[in-house]
Image (cartoon, helix red, strand yellow):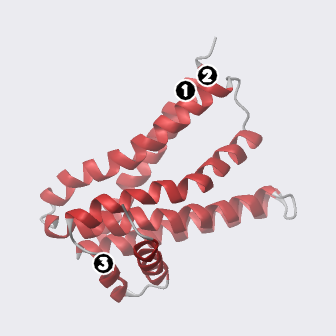
């Protein structure tokens, strides 16, 4: 079980990473225990994820029942939290940076909380109608690029790797997210 104090420390660490502070690595232990505790971030990010899904459905409705939508989204969410760390086991072994694997996944998982709420705010702002669609799209694009940069910084700092290797980590995460989204959307299209 993770304590409120532990959550406060790691969330502060993710904020420090967002300010491009390399010393933020000190807030994330390189231990198996910290690794497992970091999956509690899924619960903290879940409300933002659910609201992002609802926002997406208001902009791009699907013709599926509530049970199907809930089932697909819950399973997709769980797979996303498990698949990336699993792929990173092989990736970090191959890149010879596995000695920092636990710290990397710990920081990555907790950073998802900050990313989810940041992107929720940006998406809500863009969808609010207070700005033209073209400007909202631009704001969303800039926010997405900022998140990619943030992820790359976390990968580079926690794994102690080169920029191209950190870039590959971000590409792997993006590929997983796109694949899960495509599969999820295809499951809505197959409703008869």
In the image, is residue 41 above or below residue 60?
below
Question: Is residue 165 visible to us here?
Answer: no
Residue drawn at x 84%, y 64% as measured from the top left: 131
Question: Is residue 94 visible to us here?
Answer: yes
Position in image of residue 79 (x %, y %): 40, 41
Estimate how packed mark 3 is, as few (under 14), some (14 to 19) or many (20 or more) residues with alpha carbons within 10 Å: many
Estimate how packed mark 2 is, as few (under 14), some (14 to 19) or many (20 or more) residues with alpha carbons within 10 Å: few
**Comes first in the chain, label 3 or label 2:** 3
Callout 1–callout 3 Cβ contact below 8 Å: no
Callout 1–callout 2 Cβ contact below 8 Å: yes
Q: CA distance from mark 1 to mark 2?
A: 5 Å
In the image, is residue 47 above or below residue 16?
above
Q: Which residue is mark 2?
A: 189
Q: Which residue is mark 3?
A: 157
Q: Quadrant of residue 25?
A: bottom left
Position in image of residue 150 (x %, y %): 46, 72
Q: CA distance from mark 1 to mark 3?
A: 36 Å
Q: Quadrant of residue 10?
A: bottom left
Question: Along the line of sight, which residue is nearer the eye, 150 or 3?
Answer: 3
- Residue 177 circle label: none
Q: CA distance from mark 3 to mark 2?
A: 41 Å
- Residue 186 circle label: 1
Q: Quadrant of residue 191?
A: top right
Total labels drawn? 3
Element carrying mark 2: helix
Element carrying mark 1: helix
């Amino acid at each position: 079980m993770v304590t409120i104090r532990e959550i406060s420390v790691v969330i502060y660490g993710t904020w420090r990473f967002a300010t491009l502070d390399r010393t933020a690595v000190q807030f994330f232990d390189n231990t198996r225990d910290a690794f497992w505790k970091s999956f509690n971030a899924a619960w903290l990010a879940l409300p933002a994820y659910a609201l992002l899904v609802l926002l997406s459905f208001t902009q791009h409705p699907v013709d599926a029942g509530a049970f199907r939508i809930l089932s697909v989204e819950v399973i997709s969410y769980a797979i996303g939290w498990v698949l990336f760390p699993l792929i990173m086991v092989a990736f970090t072994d191959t890149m010879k940076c596995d000695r920092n694997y636990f710290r990397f996944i710990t920081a990555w998982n907790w950073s998802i909380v900050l990313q989810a709420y940041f992107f929720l705010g940006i998406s809500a702002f863009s969808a609010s109608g207070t700005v033209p669609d073209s400007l909202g799209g631009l704001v969303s694009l800039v926010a997405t690029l900022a998140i990619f940069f943030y992820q790359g910084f976390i990968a580079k700092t926690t794994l102690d790797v080169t920029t191209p290797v950190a870039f590959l980590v971000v590409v792997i995460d993006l590929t997983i997210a796109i694949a899960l989204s495509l599969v999820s959307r295809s499951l809505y299209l197959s409703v008869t």
